[in-house]
Every structure is written in C-alpha cells, then in structure tokens.
Image (tube, rainbow, N blue to C red):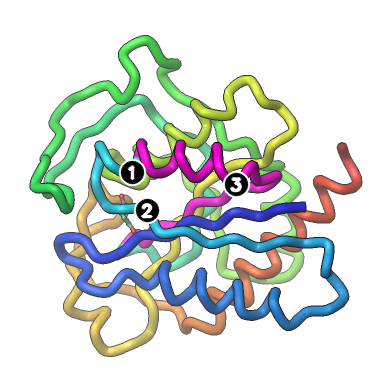
Amino acid sequence: MKILLTYFGAFPGVPVNPTQQVAQALQQRYKYRPSIESIEYVIRELPVSFARSSQELVRILRQEHPDIAISLGVAVGRSRISIEHVAINYDEARIPDNDGEQRRHQLIHAEGETAYFARLPIPFLSARMQELSLPVEVSYSAGTYVCNHVMYELLHHYAHTPDIYAGFIHIPALAVAESQNFSASADAGGVEGTIPTLEESTVVDTLDVIVSELVQHRETTL
Ligand code: PCA
C-alpha cells in the first residue's frame, strides 16, 4: 500500500511551515518500522500557489498512484489537529500566494461540484481519536486559501475513483518560539488572537495513529 503525504513550504505570515518537519518525521518513523514493510511512504512538497499547487498535485498523483493521499497544511490559530470534512469550489484570499497572486471570489473549477466531502472514514476516525483522547477535531471549513484549493483539487481528481482514501489535515502551530511570530489568517483556516500550539511530538504521534487507523480501515473494508 502506498501512502502519499504532501506538505507546504513557507508563505506570507508563516516563515517556516511546520508541516514540512512533521511530514519528514513521519517518513523517518516508517523507514525504521520493519513490521510494516508492505507500506510505502512518499512525501512531497507543494508550492503555496493557487496555480502551481494544482499542477504539481496532479503531476504527483499521476506519478505516484497512492492508495491513501493526505495533504497537510498549517492553520495558525487552531489549537487541535483538524481533519477537514469538506472542500469548497472557491478561492478567496486575504493574503497573496507565493506568486503574488491574490485570488478573490473565484471558482476553482468552473464546471466542478460546489463541494466535495473528504474521502476518509470520518465518523470512524473521529470515534477512534476520542477513544484515544488525541487532540483532534473534525473541521467543516478548510478556509478559502491554498489548503482548501489543494483539498478540492485532490478530491476532484479522485471524484470517480472510489477506493482511494483522500483528504486534508490542518495542524496547529508547533510549540517553538518562532510560532508566536506567525500571523493567523482566517482565510487560511485560522482565527485571530493568541496563537495556540502543540508539541511537535504530539502532532507526529497523532498523525501516525491517524495514518495507521486509515491503513487498517482500508485493509478491512476494501
Ligand atoms: N496553510 C495555508 C496554505 C499553506 C498552509 O500550510 C492554508 O491553510 O490555506
């Protein structure tokens, strides 16, 4: 089984994107876990650009053919890891992307569905996270910036491919000094105010559990 994790680099207000170190830490863990040799773990960076993230994502999906594809983004201002339930066909940015493009009130795909639900067993995951007391919530808005855009593209790509698990997870800022200089942008999934954080190890442990649960769920249901 192949798992693809995408992460983002820096963007305005977030000079170091914590999704990069978290994705790298997860991949390292899988490398040294001999009991799950049948799992291939691929991580790829996506540009924080409306136009280029779409192209790059589709190129990666065509090249890698993952069974489970999860994109990660940071939502500065949130205090828990958010499993996103829905992506909307709408770009509306209060800050420019890394190409200087600030999309306002624009459909992502003119002929596309208004929204897609994540292709993840969300009720199952949410119940497991509660049982394990992990800092996870289900979110019903991935914002209207590049994260929602990527989630929409991901689900649009797999709209007619039912056995692929695909979705988006937002993580909070990490408990490191530089996080307090981040700016929380509401359209990027965050809220205004003081910036809550989680320890990197908590985020990595929790994502590790989420991915393992997804692998098991997919193996037992397909
Ligand atoms: N967060 C932004 C884009 C990249 C990222 O990590 C967002 O929530 O849209």
Tag 1 near tag 2, CB within 8 Å: yes
Q: Quadrant of ligand 1?
A: bottom left
Q: CA distance from mark 1 to mark 2?
A: 6 Å
Report the label total. 3
Q: Which residue is mark 1?
A: 53
Q: Image height check: is 22 above or below 159?
A: below
As shown in the figure, which amino acid type bears the numbered disc 3?
Glu
Residue 188 rendering spot, x and y as whole percentages: 27, 50
Q: CA distance from mark 3 to mark 2?
A: 14 Å
Q: Residue at x 12, y 45 (%)?
A: 94
Residue 84 rendering spot, x and y as whole percentages: 50, 46
Q: CA distance from mark 1 to mark 3?
A: 16 Å
Closer to the N terminus: mark 1 or mark 2?
2
Q: Residue at x 36, y 25 (%)?
A: 89
As shown in the figure, which amino acid type bears the numbered disc 1?
Ser
The residue at label 3 has a CB less than 8 Å from ligand 1: no
Occupied quadrant, residue 92: top left
Quadrant assignment for the C terminus = top right
Closer to the N terminus: mark 1 or mark 3?
1
Residue 56 rendering spot, x and y as whole percentages: 38, 43
Residue 140 placement, left or right of 194: right
Q: Which residue is mark 2?
A: 46
Closer to the N terminus: mark 3 or mark 2?
2
Q: Which residue is mark 3?
A: 64
